[in-house]
């Protein structure tokens, strides 16, 4: 899996925060704010982990 270059960390954070609020998931989305500073493999793991928690908790 790769992250399309036109998708920003800010957009991913906004989507995750909105989904967490809509589903009442208790998930810390703050690591998403630093996606631009991570290697792509690490960023994909962070995204997968947080969205997985949102889907399972919410």
Image: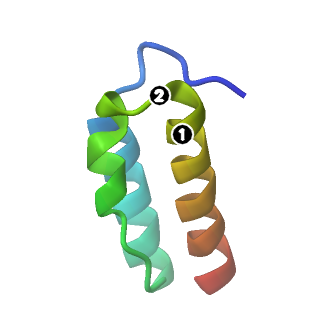
Identify the disc placed on residue 57: none
Give residue 30's quadrant in the image.
bottom left
Secondary structure category for the residue under label 2: loop
Residue 13's x, y, as percent? 34, 49
Q: Which quadrant is home to the C terminus?
A: bottom right
- Look at the numbered discs 2 and 1 and tell me whether their residues touch, using CB distance below 8 Å: yes
Residue at the top extreme, as displayed: 5
Identify the disc placed on residue 42: 1
Residue 11's x, y, as percent? 33, 38
Whether residue 37 sits left or right of residue 57 in the image: it is left
Q: Nearer the viewer, residue 14 or 53?
A: 53
Residue 4's x, y, as percent? 54, 17
Q: Which quadrant is home to the N terminus?
A: top right
Secondary structure category for the residue under label 1: helix
Q: Nearer the viewer, residue 17 or 45?
A: 45
> Relative to 14, does residue 56 appear above or below in the rendering?
below
The residue at the point 33 percent across, 36 percent down is 9
The residue at the point 34 percent across, 56 percent down is 31
Residue hosting label 2: 39
């Amino acid at each position: 899996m790769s992250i399309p270059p036109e998708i920003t960390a800010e957009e991913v954070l906004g989507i995750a925060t909105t989904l967490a609020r809509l589903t009442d998931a208790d998930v810390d989305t703050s690591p998403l704010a630093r996606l631009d500073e991570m290697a792509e493999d690490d960023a994909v793991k962070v995204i997968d982990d947080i969205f997985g928690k949102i889907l399972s908790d919410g």
